[in-house]
Image (tube, rainbow, N blue to C red):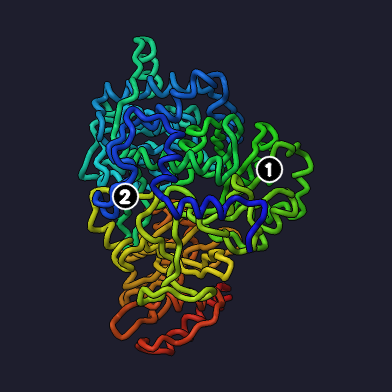
């Protein structure tokens, strides 16, 4: 299905014929302290490394180099409907804030290569923190503020940070979420304690500080500024880590995705113009959170590298104050492009199905909507197209890749849309579909979606302190390929169709969460003998977790009471982000004869999808029991 208007095929073919030349040209958009000795070295790392020998600084490229030409332009617009507060930060002001914070970090003993954990809400200081770390060559690890103490503790123990940056609280609508007590509890749980913490005091909640460990953010910044302390940008290798971002692992232990400096900058800069189709100086909004990869790539780094104005929004798509919240932000700030999760638009559609609130706002600046983070169902895409009358671009990528793998490149001229498909692979990615034996399958045939090695610039080179786990998780199943753990097919026109996960990661409103981690929490309850968590299809959030528990025979407590306790336990240990609201007591779980729980079959029953009895099942009658229980609870499709 070629398009005469799109340059996609020409550009993709050019990349395919000369990958190194393609990325060498793209790298000219970045300011290097020293150019690369090799654009790509296939002998380095697990599958090769990009821009080997180059020296650079990501903060310099995102902030400092823009100050001369666009110092007065807005770099970040902070819009917080929950506090009824807005703040515009120019590139020149951003440079001052970041250089001062970087100096404070240096005064706290942070040096190049040290890790800094950032546990913060959606406020400008979160972006300052990331950029300040990049400025001095420290490696930041941002932890989503919705995670509870135990989840934070596991990440602290793995990253072993010298310093933690946090805030007194976050805000979810009218609800104040105390961050500082969660941080204190997490540090108590940790074997690896930070040397110090820097705490941003928000007016919504006063917090106490621990003497000798905790410093006050505002006081330290004021002291640095009054002393004229500003940290310079430190030269780092292009292959040095910029950050570690933890993503759910199938064992419940999070995986620290490493992102390098040089390749990441090149890929993000290329994607802003060529994929998203935005120009320097324009206003770009990714309605996500800095705790997720979208926040790293397209709230902070991508827009700033490109010289855009980034929106940092502290609010929800509905309820702050209504389902017109997104339209208000677009109109107020002249947003040209919005990137968010399909679940946000499902929520807006649920509250305002006729889009009456849209009529209140001037949307003349707006020209494109991008959706990713979970599968964009055709109904939601069509609804958004109908009300907005702009291109609605579903695209697909992962925390691991750092930037889009498959999408409709507006900057190259849009291709025809097929609802339900995120369209085509972008330059840098050769996407294939294989069967269980590693053989390519014909067009239209379901299989495992894989990416031919090497991965492009910007994708993860490894996992933090876990090279063996990196190879085992991603490179060993299909030699010569990166295993995405997603399933789907490629049609006769080369369009990719991503149909679901092949492991036990579930996608709740765009947040990838491990069912293994939730099972660990359920199993900790004294009444639970065994359990299984699956993701059940949900019209609003994409998937929601459902926990099946088998109680110990000695339990005297009523099952309904236990189920209520289990819901509270997951909320406490994982956090509200898990959206865990349903625990179901069952007499037994369906298993293979070797003892493996048949989660995939349980999910099909819950979703109302066609299913068959697995050949290896121990007792087929259990599947009927599961179906009956689900129907009694109003779950089975």
Q: Residue at x 48, y 38 (%)?
A: 269
Of marks 1 and 2, which one's residue comes earlier in the chain? Answer: 1
Q: Residue 169, how many percent across, how many down?
A: 45, 35
Disc sitting over residue 461 in the figure: 2
Q: Can the viewer see residue 509 in this picture?
A: no
Q: Nearer the viewer, residue 296 or 440?
A: 440
Q: Nearer the viewer, residue 593 or 141?
A: 141
Up-down relation of residue 559 to residue 308 (above or below): below
Up-down relation of residue 129 to residue 159 (above or below): above
Does the CB distance between marks 1 and 2 fall below 8 Å?
no
Q: Residue 531, how many percent across, how many down?
A: 36, 71
The secondary structure type at the circle numbered 2 is loop
Residue 469: quadrant of the picture: bottom left
Q: Residue at x 60, y 44 (%)?
A: 411
Give the side of residue 155 with respect to residue 346, left or right.
left
Q: Residue at x 35, y 44 (%)?
A: 259
Disc sitting over residue 443 in the figure: none
Mark 2 surroundings: few (<14), some (14-19) or many (≥20) residues within 10 A: many
Using the numbered discs, state the Cα–Cα distance from disc 1 to disc 2 in whole angstroms: 35 Å
Give the side of residue 361 with respect to residue 514, left or right.
right
Q: Can the viewer see residue 557 in this picture?
A: yes
Viewport quadrant of the C terminus: bottom right
Q: Residue 9, how many percent across, how many down?
A: 56, 55
Q: Nearer the viewer, residue 492 or 568?
A: 492
Up-down relation of residue 598 to residue 382 (above or below): below
Give the side of residue 612 with respect to residue 528, left or right.
right
Viewport quadrant of the N terminus: bottom right
Mark 1 surroundings: few (<14), some (14-19) or many (≥20) residues within 10 A: some
Q: Residue 120, how many percent across, how many down?
A: 42, 37
Residue 196: quadrant of the picture: top left
Disc sitting over residue 367 in the figure: 1
How many numbered circles does the render carry? 2
């Amino acid at each position: 299905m070629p398009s005469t208007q799109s340059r996609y095929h020409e550009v993709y073919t050019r990349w395919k014929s000369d990958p190194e030349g393609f990325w060498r040209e793209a790298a000219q958009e970045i300011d290097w302290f020293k150019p690369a000795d090799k654009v790509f070295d296939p002998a380095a790392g697990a599958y090769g490394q990009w821009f080997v020998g180059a020296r650079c600084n990501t903060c310099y490229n995102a902030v400092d180099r823009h100050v001369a030409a666009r110092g007065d332009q807005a770099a970040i617009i902070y819009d917080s409907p929950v506090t009824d507060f807005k703040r515009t930060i120019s590139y020149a002001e951003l440079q001052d804030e970041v250089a001062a914070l970087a100096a404070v970090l240096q005064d706290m003993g942070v040096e190049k290569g040290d890790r800094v954990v950032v546990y913060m809400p959606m406020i400008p200081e979160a972006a300052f923190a990331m950029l300040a770390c990049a400025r001095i060559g420290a490696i930041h690890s941002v932890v989503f503020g919705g995670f509870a103490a135990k989840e934070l503790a596991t990440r602290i123990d793995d990253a072993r940070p010298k310093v933690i940056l946090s805030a007194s609280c976050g805000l979810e609508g009218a609800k104040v979420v105390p961050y500082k007590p969660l941080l204190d509890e997490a540090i108590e749980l940790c074997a690896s304690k930070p040397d110090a913490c820097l705490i941003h005091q928000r007016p919504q909640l006063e917090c106490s500080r621990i003497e000798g460990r905790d410093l006050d953010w505002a006081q330290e910044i004021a002291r640095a500024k009054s002393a004229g302390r500003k940290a310079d940008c430190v030269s780092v290798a292009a292959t040095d880590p910029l950050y570690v971002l933890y993503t759910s692992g199938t064992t419940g232990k999070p995986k620290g995705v490493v992102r390098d400096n040089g390749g990441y900058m090149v890929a993000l800069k290329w994607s802003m113009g060529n994929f998203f189709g935005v120009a320097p100086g324009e206003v770009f909004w990714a309605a996500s959170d800095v705790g997720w990869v979208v926040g790293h790539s397209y709230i902070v780094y991508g827009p700033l590298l490109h010289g855009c104005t980034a929106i940092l929004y502290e609010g929800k798509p509905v309820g702050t104050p209504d389902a017109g919240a997104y339209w208000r932000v677009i109109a107020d700030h002249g947003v040209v492009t919005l990137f968010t999760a399909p679940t946000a638009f499902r929520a807006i559609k649920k509250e305002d199905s006729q889009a009456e609130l849209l009529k209140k706002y001037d949307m003349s600046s707006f020209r494109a909507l991008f959706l990713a983070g979970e599968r964009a169902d055709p109904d939601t895409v069509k609804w958004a197209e109908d009300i907005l009358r702009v291109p609605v671009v579903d695209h697909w990528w992962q925390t691991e890749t750092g930037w889009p793998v498959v999408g409709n490149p507006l900057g190259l001229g849009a291709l025809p849309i097929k609802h339900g498909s995120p369209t085509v692979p972008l330059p840098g990615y050769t996407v294939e579909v294989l069967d269980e034996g590693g053989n390519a399958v014909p067009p239209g045939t379901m299989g495992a979606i894989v990416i031919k090695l090497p991965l492009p610039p910007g994708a993860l080179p490894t996992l933090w302190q876990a090279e063996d786990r990196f190879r085992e998780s991603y490179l060993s199943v299909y030699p010569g390929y990166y295993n995405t753990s997603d399933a789907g097919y490629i049609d006769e026109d080369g369009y990719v169709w991503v149909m679901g996960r092949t492991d036990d990661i579930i996608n709740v409103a765009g947040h990838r969460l491990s069912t293994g981690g939730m099972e660990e929490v359920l199993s900790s309850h004294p009444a639970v003998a065994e359990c299984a968590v699956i993701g059940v299809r949900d019209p609003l959030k994409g998937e929601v977790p459902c926990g099946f528990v088998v109680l110990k025979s000695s339990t005297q407590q009523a099952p309904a009471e236990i189920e209520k306790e289990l819901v509270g336990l997951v909320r406490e240990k994982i956090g509200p982000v898990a959206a865990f609201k349903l625990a179901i007591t069952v007499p037994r779980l369906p298993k293979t004869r070797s003892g493996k729980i048949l989660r995939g079959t349980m999910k099909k029953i819950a979703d109302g999808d066609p299913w068959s009895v697995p050949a290896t099942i121990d007792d087929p009658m259990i599947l009927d029991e599961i179906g009956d229980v689900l129907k009694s609870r109003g779950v089975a499709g």
